[in-house]
Image: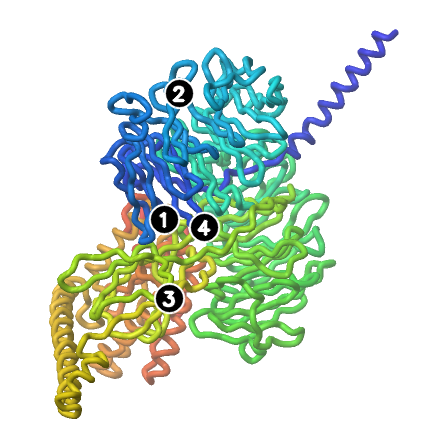
Amino acid sequence: MDQVRMRCVVGLLAWAMLCLLPVAQATTPIQGWPLLRHYGANQLPAPPAYADVVVTSDGSLYAGSGEGVMLFRSGVWEVLEVAGSAPVYSLLLARDGSIYVAGNGVFGQLRPRPDGTHDFVDLLPRLASAGPLRVPAEVYSLGETSRGIHAVSAGAFFELRSDGTTSRRALIGAGSFKLMVAGDEVYYRVEGEGLYRMGASAPERVAGTGALANLRVAGVWAYQGGLLVAAGDGFHFSDGRQLHKLGSEADTAFVQHAPYTGIALANGGWVIGSSDGTVLRFSPDLRLLDSVRPNRGGMHDFVEDAEGSLWVVGESGLTRLRLSLPWTRYDHRHGLGGRLFDSTWYDGQLWVAGMGVWRARASAGSSPQFSQLPWPYPDMETFALRGTDAGLVVGDRHGLMVLDPGADQPRRLLDVELANSVTHLLPSAFNSRWMLARGIRQMNLLEQRDGRWQVRAQWPSQVRVLQGLYEVAPGEVWAGDGAGGVHYWRLDLDTGQLQEHRRYTAEQGVLLEPGYGTRVFASGGELYAISGMRVSRWNGERFVAAALPPLPGLMSPWELEGQDNEQGGFAWTSRQLWWRRPGATDFELQRVGDGRMPGFATPALHRDGQVRVVTRDSVLQLDGTHSGPTLAPARARLDRIELRRPGHGAQVLPLSPAAARQLPAGAGLVLRFGIQSMEPEVEFRYRMPGYHDVWSPWSAGRELTYQRLPGGDYTFQLQARVRGDLPTEPVDYPLQVAAFWYQRVWAWLLFGGVGVVFVAMVVRLRTRSVNARNRELEWKIAARTAALEAANARLSALAVTDGLTGIANRHAMEKALQRLWQGCARHNEPLAVMMIDVDHFKRFNDSYGHHMGDLQLRRVADILSAGMRDADELVARYGGEEFMVILPACEAAAAASRAEQLRSAVEQETARAGLPVTISVGVAVAHPQPDEDPMALVRCADQALYRVKFGGRNRVEAAVLDDWATVRT
C-alpha cells in the first residue's frame, strides 16, 4: 500500500512539473549584454599582447602591451616610454599613486609629474642587490601590502620595503606563480599542494587547502573573517583551518568556463574571467548575474574604474563594460541586423521590427539569440509591433496584419497598398479593446471582436509627417504635424466612430517657427506643442506659451517625445534619453550612447514588465531595480600646458599651479584639454576673460594655441562634457603675463631723470610704433595667407561649383553621391535624395526675362542651401531649373518632412521677395548596398518628381515600390 501511495505521489509531482514547465519558461528573465566599447589592436597605439591594466583616481588608465605601457586619458590613447619597447606583463597601482611596471627585462616605477608627464625609475638594480637575476630578468607578478611592494621573478619572491631595503626568498614549488593579495597578506597556489601564504620568513601552507592542489585558483579575497577562493570547481571558503566548498551557480559556470583571474567589485560582488574570454559577474551572495564574452580569444585581467565600469584586458584588445548602468543591450551579437524600428513582448518572446521581423525566446543562463522570420518580407521594413492577448499586431510597408494566437502565419487586416505604410500603433490606455494604427494616407481604428483584431473604422490621416502621437483621455488623440500645427481627434470608444477633428494653429495659440513644423510632447499629464525652440502648452481651451519640464542638457527640443508608464517617465530625442524614476520629480539624462547618433525610438513597457528602447541598430533594456554607484560629476582639466617663446624650446608647465602662473613677456601657450572621465566621446569649450570673453563653440578639438599673449592678468577657463551629457563646472588656470621692459614702471622712472616728458613721449610712441608694426606685419602675413588660401580654394571650386548659382555642380553631386552611398552602406544607414524642379520656370523666363530668371535660380539655390543642417548634406544644381539634395542618415519620414520644409521655404521666401515661384519635390530613400548603383536612387526620386509635376505641382511625393521596380529593370 505504501508503495502504491509513493508511486501516486511521484506521478502527481511529475504531472505538476510538466504543468509548471511552460509557466517557468514564460517567466524566465531575458537579458542583453552590458553596454560596452571595445578597443581593438587597430585602435590602440601599441601592439599585442595586452596583459594588465590599472586606473588612477584622476580617471587615467594604464595598460601593459607588447611595446611598453599605454596611457588612456580624456578619450585619447598614447604610449609611455619605459625601458625601451619591452613587453609589459604586470602593472600595480601603489598606495602612493605611483605605478609599478614589470615585464621582460623591465621592472620599475612610473611616477606622474605635476606637469602631466611621467618619470620612469628603473628598479632592476634593487632586485639584483638582493641576489642574482636571470638576464634578461622576467618579472611577471606584482602585489602590495603594508610591508612594501612584492614581485616574482624566476621562482624567487622579492619584497621592496618602504625603508629602501630589498629581500629575496625562494618560493616553494616551480613555475610562474601569480601573487594574490587578500587583506594584508600575499598568497599563491602551488601545483599538487594547495594554497600558500608568504609568511614573515618563509612561505606557509594554508591549512586544509589540499583540495586546491589540482585546481586553478583565479583569486583570493578576505571574506567573512576568512578567505573566499575562486577555484576551478566553484567558490571555497577557508577559515584558516579547513576549506569548505560553497555551493553556488559557479559550480556549473566554472566547469564550462575555466576561471583564470578575478577581482572584487566596489559594490561587494565579484567578477571572474575565464581562459576562453568569458566574463562572469557574481553578486555579494555569489549569485551569477550575467555572463558575457566581450573579447575574442583569452583574457588576462580586469580593473574597475571610478565610474563603476569594468575594463577587460584580452588578447584582442581592451573592452569597457558599463556594469554601473541599469541598461543592457541586444545587438548584432544576439543576431539582430539592419535598421531597427520597434520592439514588443508576445507569447513569451521578444519581437523586434526592422528589415522584417526578428524573434528571440527567453533562455535561462545565456543571452538570447534572434532569428528572422520569413514574413512579411525579410528585405522590407516593418515599422511597428504590439503584443496583445488577441495576437501580435504588425505595421509594415504594405499596411497592417496580425499574428493570431497559435498561428504560424499572419493575416492581413488591410488590403496590400504600397503607399499606405503603417508606421505607428497606439493601443488605447483606457480601453484595451481599441488600438489606433496610423498609415501614411489614413488612420485605422482597430477593435477586438470575439478575441480577434478587426478594422472598425477609417478616416483620412490629414498629417503628411507625423510628429508625436498621444492619447491623453479616453478617445482623445493628439498629433503633431511636420507642416505645422496640431491635430486633435475625438473618438467614440463604444461605437468606434470619429466624432470630431480639429487642427490648431497660431490662431489657437500654437507658437510656430518657420521650417520646423510642430511636434506634440506629453509628460506628467501635460501636453506641449514644440516648433523649433518655441514651446506652447494646452491649458484645456487653447495653447499658451510655456516652458518644458527640466531636461538636463536638452539639445534638440524640436525632436522631443515622451511616455509615462509604471517604470517612470521617459523623454527622448534621436540623440538623448532621459528617465524619471517612479516617485521622483526630476529627469535624469541617461549615458547610453557610444559616440555615434543612437537614434532613440519609443521606450515601451513590455508585457514581461521590462522597459525596452529601440535604437538605430540595437535594443536597450532597463533594469529598474538596478542601483549603481552614485558617481561624482566629471571634472574638466588640462592634460598638458606648454610655454612657447621665441628662441627657446617648449617648456612643460605644472597643471595645477598653487598661484597664478608667471609667464615672460611675449609668451605663447599650447594647451591640451582633458576630462576626468573614461568616456571616449567628449567635447570642450573655453574662454579667457580680458582676452576673449565669450565662450567658444563646443568642439571635439583638444588643443589650443596662443601665439603671443599681451601683458596682463588672465584666468583661462575650460568646460568639458561627454557628448550629449551635461557640462562640467569650469576649471580655472590663472596667468600673469609680464609686460616688455619698455612697458614697465621702472623704465618710465629711469627715463624720467633725463626728461620725463620727452622720454615718456618717446616710449609711448615707440610702444605704439612697435605694436603697430607688429599688427601690420601680422595683418600682412594673415592677408597674404588668406589670399593664397582663397586662390587655392577658387581653383578647387571651379571644378565642382556651378557658375550661376554658386552651389555644387552635377559633377560634384555625382562624386558626393558615390561617397555618401558607400559611407551609408558601411554604417548600415539610410540615404535620402530629393529631385527638385522649379515649377513653370519657362513661363517665368518669358514673363520676366532671362536675367531675372537667373537671379531667381540663385535665390532658390540660396534658400535650399540654408535648409542644410549638417556638413555631409549637399545641395547641387542638376541642370537647368532642376536641383538635387542628398541627405545621409535620413529616414523616409524625416526626408519627407525636410522636403516639405524646403518647399514651404521657397514658396514663402520668393513671395516675400516679390517674385513668387514654387517647387515640386520627389523624394527617394534607400539603405545602400556597396555593389548597387547609387544613380538608381536618383532615378527613383525622378520618378516621384514626374508624378508631382503631372499631378498638380507645388507638392512633395515619396517614391514607392513601383518606382524601384521601374528603375531596376
On residue 717, the disc is: 3
User: Which mark is first along the chain, 2 or 4?
Assistant: 2
Is the C-beta separation of discs 1 and 4 under 8 Å?
Answer: no
Q: Amino acid at mark 2?
A: Arg
The answer to whether 160 is drawn above or below residue 846 in the figure is above
On residue 169, the disc is: 2
Residue located beneath label 1 in the image: 73
Secondary structure of residue under mark 4: loop
Alpha carbon distance from label 3 to label 1: 20 Å
Secondary structure of residue under mark 1: strand
Alpha carbon distance from label 3 to label 4: 27 Å
Secondary structure of residue under mark 3: strand
Q: Amino acid at mark 1?
A: Arg
Q: Residue at x 61, y 55 (%)?
A: 426
Q: Amino acid at mark 3?
A: Gln
1 or 2: mark nearer the eye: 2
